[in-house]
Image (tube, rainbow, N blue to C red):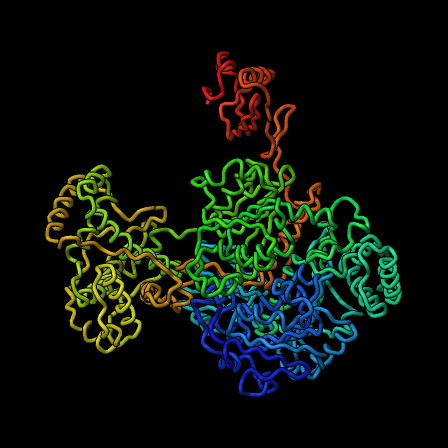
């Protein structure tokens, strides 16, 4: 649950029936709609950064403020409408008005997770409100339960229709298109395994940020005085510029004419250079420095009305290029279905050949009316599938399209990201069972799964209910998966079982997208809360929730019998290490793995099917490039370097050193022995830090903590910089005669502390409070009073500092440690141990320190205040642009950007594949891996890659292959080795994995091999017991 409603009391829900929505704000809704985005953003309430941190990392503050001022209508509250509304409420729009004049029926329970059997007969919109409101009390949720008039649309920035005739949609869209300002109109449908989206954001719509990516930058190395000018950049990182991009220059020395802030177009973009369409022959000569930054200009789109676009749709947004001819046919199919429903006032009956033919006839008639643009051929079989399942709204399809449409609404309300322009069609007919379905298989059974049965038949439904699934993780992906699986009927029989495990607990930041959690669940285990919520969606769900991390350490819990019992594994993880482990177990036990992940508006899915596809670990992304240690510690040139250093200093001062102190105090002799055994520079440095902490830097009062913080400020941001510039003056040269301070190095300047500078004082406040925590010193009330804190700081006496000759500062980018080894480390360590033991005798009995573990998601704990202060003071040293605390949190906290829309889409796509996995018998070309970016938008679907085949002589195998040997325990080993003797040049020195099932008389072994070509080393080995060989 999120903060209280804006403008009304929490829990207030208004039913507007046939009336226009009551304005949510004091100003009339019509007038509010006419406000420009900047005004709307200015009026928006403050953003709860703890709650929305992951979403802020995607959208930014301005977009979030525009969302907070937006009113949206969602018409049609079957499964698709429910998914869209859920995503919008989680995103935090100002208000969502639900329109539906229909009653809840049994079919709705297949896809609308807000509804239960007790809601049957109630108005759909009203029945959804209570559970929808729980997701975010800050969003005003209202309903319209009667007919909707076009005049009512003027109260909204965006309107979404999920079940409307084309005739009515054209009427509403014409009104929205011509309204001043235009109202964004979105029409979307899910019909069985087919879906569509249409967007019209008005005659002219301005996209403020096309892709949401940070502007690309480069560090200038040289600029020629030419026409056109050649700009070369340092080879620290490849440039991401493209021909035609606009860029601006800053910090250029010499050729200062380029620092005017004017955007300039580039061409001939290469990995480390480009040319400017500008004559620089008369400019000053380039000396050094310079940052070049991409400019992302707004883009204006001109949308057609629905009436125009139906006749001339233009280019369709593609998702699967193996179905290149599919969108035009589906464009016809949805028009034919609309005509069928208009004339017969119902949907085609599932499995009815007569109804399917009637829809095909409508499609042919519409096609003939298109003249020269008509299709040459119509796939009647595809239209039969379309007609048969058209009444059904399947949950995976609703989840997928709910994510897409929810994101389009965000774009319409904020101008963030490129809209879908204008039609998108999708189908997943490959999800159907491979065997033909008879009409009798599709008949309803008066159950909550009737909609799904009308598409897939009763046989597959029973398989779904009896399936045994292992889901790893119950965070954002996990919540969506549990909802989907419950609605699909997965593991919803006595013979089925869904096992979900997650060792994490719920935090406040989870609530903006992990929709099964509420604020009263904070601190509780994710898996148990999510499983309980899923059972509320479908009481028949047979689920077991565990709090174990799936890892080698828990193989006693997830043992061989457990893995052998599974039908499939669904990953809902957020780290590669865990994914690799689960992948290895799935390969070992030959189980299908359905993998997915998200990053902001991007998502991907990967199907791992035994013997058909490569496994997850077969291909990996290249490792993320790490900045050299010397760059981070002495030569930073961007804010990431400063924040990496800040996080390292935080952990060293407040966690690692206090932990080392406690380790020494708890076992002095053992600690000393370990230091002597190590005997290296690292052990020496560690001892020096512990001594410093307990001696010179020991704090007994809060004033001591202030003194410590003030001295640290002087050391970090003044003295160290003075030493660095003394060792390497601004005119220093390298051994090759080049300037030492050439790009990407930036020459630093020491800071002069001022108690009147709020940023200086905030750094000292955070450092003093956290230092006091480590020593268990109470924080006085006056500490947070800036005036009194400044008075206390001004009392600190600073020692004089003079740079020293001969100080070694690491400049080697390949260096992995800043500690310098010494020939007398062992002798120094002995002296340090003696000093440490002497200091320990002066400590009071029971003395210990309180190490502080970094926690990024608590804005009251001063952790991010200190890290942001560290980073920004260092950035100020090096003339690097500073960042606010939120941006510092994203980088230093390594926050993964996340939004509900891409998560919903990913899980919907995976569940479409799950139908195939549990049905069985599908070929590799039936499966789909997907990469999608909702920001652009881009959808790319393709067949999974088959497993790599290894060949030798007349044999071939993949990672999925193994030999199964059966026989009595006494005789199988000899026969096995004799059989291998047919290839006398082979031996099998490494058995990578062995699985044994012991039976009363016989044994089965499954073996995975790593082959090395080599003759047998001894005949005796042929007769050895396998355990002796291993």
Report whether 599 appears left or right of 385.
left
Which residue sits at x=38%, y=60%? Answer: 637
Q: Residue 511: percent from the left, percent from the top?
A: 49, 64
Above/below status of 292 relative to 606: below
> Which one is nearer the viewer's eye here, 262 or 184?
184
Could you tell me if residue 287 is visible in this image? Answer: no
Q: Is residue 276 left or right of residue 503?
A: right
The residue sitting at the top extreme is 1019
> Residue extending furthest front?
118
Which quadrant of the view contains residue 370?
Answer: bottom right
**Position of residue 508 measured from the top left corner of the image (x, y, whole percent):** 44, 64
Residue pictured at 81% horizontal, 48% vertical: 438
Image position, residue 345 (x, y; %): 82, 69
Q: Is residue 250 visible?
A: yes
Horizontally, residue 18 falls left or right of residue 809, namely: right
Query: Is 456 in front, or is 117?
Result: 117
Residue beneath the point at 47% across and 22% down: 1027
Q: Nearer the viewer, residue 65 or 394?
A: 394
As drawn, 549 above or below 173: above
> Toward which corner of the image does residue 78 lie, by quadrant?
bottom right
Total labels drawn: 0
Estimate the x, y position of residue 999 in percent, counting from the top left.
56, 25
């Amino acid at each position: 649950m999120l903060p209280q409603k804006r403008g009304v009391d929490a829990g207030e829900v208004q039913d507007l029936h046939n009336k226009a929505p009551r304005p949510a704000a004091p100003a009339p809704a019509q007038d509010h709609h006419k406000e420009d985005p900047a005004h709307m953003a200015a009026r928006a309430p403050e953003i709860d950064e703890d709650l929305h941190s992951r979403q802020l990392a995607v959208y930014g503050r301005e977009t979030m403020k525009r969302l907070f001022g937006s009113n949206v209508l969602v018409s049609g509250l079957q499964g698709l409408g429910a998914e869209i509304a859920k995503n919008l409420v989680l995103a935090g729009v100002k208000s969502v008005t639900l329109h539906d004049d229909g009653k809840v029926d049994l079919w709705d329970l297949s896809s609308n997770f807000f509804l239960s059997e007790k809601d049957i007969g109630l108005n759909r919109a009203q029945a959804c409100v209570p559970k929808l409101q729980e997701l975010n009390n800050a969003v005003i949720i209202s309903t319209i339960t009667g007919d909707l008039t076009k005049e009512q649309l003027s109260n909204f920035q965006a309107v979404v229709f999920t079940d409307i005739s084309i005739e009515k949609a054209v009427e509403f869209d014409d009104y929205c298109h011509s309204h001043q300002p235009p109202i964004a109109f979105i029409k979307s449908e899910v019909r069985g395994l087919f879906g569509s989206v249409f967007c019209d954001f008005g005659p002219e719509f301005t996209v403020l940020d096309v892709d949401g990516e940070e502007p690309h930058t480069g560090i200038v190395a040289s600029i020629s005085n030419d026409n056109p000018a050649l700009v070369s950049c340092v080879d620290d990182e490849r440039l991401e510029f493209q021909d035609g991009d606009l860029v601006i220059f800053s910090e250029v020395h010499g050729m200062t004419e380029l620092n005017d802030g004017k955007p300039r177009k580039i061409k001939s973009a290469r990995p480390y250079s480009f040319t400017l369409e500008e004559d620089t022959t008369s400019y000053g000569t380039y000396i050094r420095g310079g940052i070049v930054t991409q400019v992302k200009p707004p883009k204006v789109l001109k949308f057609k009305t629905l009436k125009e676009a139906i006749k001339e749709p233009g280019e369709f947004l593609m998702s699967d290029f193996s179905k290149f001819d599919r969108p035009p046919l589906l464009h016809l199919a949805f028009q034919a279905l609309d005509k069928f429903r208009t004339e017969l006032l119902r949907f085609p009956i599932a499995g009815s050949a007569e109804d399917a033919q009637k829809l095909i006839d409508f499609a042919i008639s519409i096609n003939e009316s298109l003249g020269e643009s008509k299709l040459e051929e119509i796939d009647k079989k595809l239209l039969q599938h379309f007609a048969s399942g058209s009444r059904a709204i399947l949950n995976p399809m609703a989840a997928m399209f709910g994510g897409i449409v929810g994101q389009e609404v965000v774009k319409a309300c904020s101008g963030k990201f490129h809209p879908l322009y204008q039609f998108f069609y999708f189908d997943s007919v490959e999800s159907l069972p491979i065997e033909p379905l008879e009409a009798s298989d599709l008949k309803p059974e008066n159950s909550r799964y009737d909609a799904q049965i009308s598409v897939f038949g009763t046989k597959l439904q029973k398989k779904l209910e009896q399936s045994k699934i292992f889901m790893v993780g119950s965070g954002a992906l996990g919540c969506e998966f549990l909802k989907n699986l419950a609605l699909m009927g997965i593991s919803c029989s006595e013979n089925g079982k869904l096992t979900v495990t997650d060792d994490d607990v719920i935090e406040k930041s989870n609530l903006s997208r992990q929709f099964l959690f509420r604020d009263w669940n904070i601190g509780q285990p994710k898996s148990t809360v999510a499983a309980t919520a899923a059972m509320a969606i479908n009481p028949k769900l047979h689920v077991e929730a565990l709090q174990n991390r799936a890892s080698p350490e828990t193989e006693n819990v997830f043992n061989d019998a457990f893995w052998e019992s599974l039908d499939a594994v669904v990953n809902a993880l957020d780290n590669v290490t865990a994914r690799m482990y689960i992948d290895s177990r799935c390969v070992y036990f030959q189980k299908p793995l359905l993998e997915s992940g998200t990053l902001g508006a991007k998502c991907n899915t990967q199907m791992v099917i035994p013997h058909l596809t490569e496994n997850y670990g077969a291909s990996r992304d290249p490792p993320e490039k790490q900045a050299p240690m010397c760059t981070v510690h002495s030569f930073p040139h961007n804010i990431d370097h400063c924040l990496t250093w800040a996080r390292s200093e935080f952990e060293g001062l407040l966690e690692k050193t206090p932990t080392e102190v406690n380790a020494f105090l708890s076992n002095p002799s053992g600690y000393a022995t370990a230091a002597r055994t190590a005997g290296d520079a690292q052990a020496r440095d560690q001892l020096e830090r512990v001594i410093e902490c307990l001696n010179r830097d020991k704090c007994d009062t809060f004033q001591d903590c202030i003194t410590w913080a003030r001295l640290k400020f002087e050391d970090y941001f003044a003295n160290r910089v003075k030493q660095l510039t003394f060792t390497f003056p601004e005119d220093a040269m390298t051994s090759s005669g080049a300037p030492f301070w050439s790009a990407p190095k930036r020459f630093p300047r020491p800071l002069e502390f001022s108690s009147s500078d709020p940023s200086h004082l905030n750094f000292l406040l955070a450092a003093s409070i956290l230092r006091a925590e480590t020593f268990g010193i109470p924080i006085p009330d006056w500490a947070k009073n800036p005036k009194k804190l400044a008075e206390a700081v001004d009392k600190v006496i600073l020692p004089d500092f003079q740079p020293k000759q001969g100080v070694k500062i690491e400049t080697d980018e390949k260096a992995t440690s800043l500690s310098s080894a010494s020939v007398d480390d062992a002798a120094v360590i002995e002296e340090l141990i003696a000093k440490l033991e002497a200091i320990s005798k002066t400590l009071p009995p029971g003395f210990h320190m309180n190490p502080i573990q970094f926690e990024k998601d608590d804005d009251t704990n001063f952790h991010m205040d200190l890290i942001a202060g560290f980073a920004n003071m260092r950035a100020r040293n090096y003339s690097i642009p500073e960042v606010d605390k939120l941006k510092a949190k994203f980088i230093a906290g390594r926050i993964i950007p996340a939004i509900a829309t891409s998560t919903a889409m990913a899980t919907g796509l995976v569940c479409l594949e799950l139908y195939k996995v549990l049905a069985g018998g599908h070929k590799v070309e039936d499966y789909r891996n997907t990469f999608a970016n909702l920001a652009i938008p881009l959808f790319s679907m393709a067949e999974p890659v088959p497993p790599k085949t290894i060949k030798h002589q007349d044999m071939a195998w993949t990672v999925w292959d193994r030999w199964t040997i059966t026989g009595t325990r006494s005789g199988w080993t000899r026969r096995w080795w004799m059989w291998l003797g047919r290839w006398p040049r082979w031996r099998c020195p490494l058995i990578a994995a062995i699985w044994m099932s012991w039976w009363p008389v016989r044994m089965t072994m499954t073996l995975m091999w790593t082959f090395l070509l080599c003759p047998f080393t001894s005949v005796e080995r042929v007769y050895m017991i396998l355990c002796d060989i291993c």
